[in-house]
Image (spheres, rainbow, N blue to C red):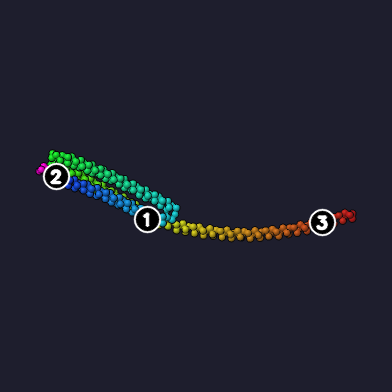
Amino acid sequence: ARSKQQAASDRAQLDGLLAESEEKVTAVEIEWRAKALEAKAKDSAATALLRAELAEAEASALASATEKDTAVDTAALEAQMRAQLTKSKERVAAENAELRAHLADAEEKVARVQAELRAKEAATQHKASGGVRASTEMVELRALLIEAGETAAEEQAALKSQMKEVRDKAAASKSELTAQLEEAADRAAINETEWTSKLEESKDKCRAADTKLRKQADEAKRRASADDESLQEERTLREDEGAAASDKIKRLTARSDELRAETRRLENIV
């Protein structure tokens, strides 16, 4: 009767330890999943922030574009920022994949420990029913539970360390990209000032060239008008000379006709 009471007591204690172990394992799993979701949420928030900063930098760069070269610089800067953002996202995605792999490995280890615990419980129950080596199995089970707890603690510590490393890398990437965005904004401001100065200088040169061309055109018109007046006078003079020559020819012709008539008259008299 005492052996049965001892076996029942051992079984109750075993059930309590097993339940406590399962609760601890479940708590660890819940905590791991919460940490993974938190890391994913922070990564998404950081990515959204980086995209917003990139969009702001793009808007600033596009607003400052006043010449073709500035537009080319802005496009190159946009491509560089997008490549940097893609690289950062790929790095964070790889780290998240590695973290998920570690979490899956930890879950597999926990499941394996649970299976071993259940197997040990079944073997202990079978042996305890016959009153054979119940205390030895209890000791082994307690050792196994302690080992499982230590393993879970180690996995949890490793997971926390990895998540901290991921957060640190994400923060470093954010700082680096933020610095690059600030540098790009500074370059855009410098380019805007430079191109504004060049644009004003170009406008001044265009106005000066336009004034010079207008003066040259006015001078050419004046010379053309003077040349036209001179040609008109020359043509009038030539026309007058031609008319005078024509009148002279007519007079000479008339005189020649008179001389011919007089010659014929004299010949007839002779």
Circle 1: is it few (<14), some (14-19), or many (20+) Cα within 10 Å?
some
Q: Disc 1 vs disc 2: which is toward the camera?
A: 2
Is 227 included in the stretch rendered in magenta?
A: no
What residue type is disc 2 on?
Answer: Ala
Q: Residue at x 44, y 54 (%)?
A: 67
Is 3 included in the stretch rendered in magenta?
A: yes
Q: Could you say which quadrant of the image residue 243 lies in? A: bottom right
Range of magenta residues:
1-13
Q: Could you say which quadrant of the image residue 102 lies in? A: top left
Marks 1/2: CA–CA distance: 71 Å
**What residue is shown with label 3?**
257
The answer to whether residue 153 is visible is no
Figure quadrant of the C terminus: bottom right
Q: Nearer the viewer, residue 224 or 255?
A: 224
Q: Is residue 175 left or right of residue 202?
A: left
**What residue is shown with label 2?**
8
Chief secondary structure of the magenta portion: helix
Marks 1/3: CA–CA distance: 106 Å
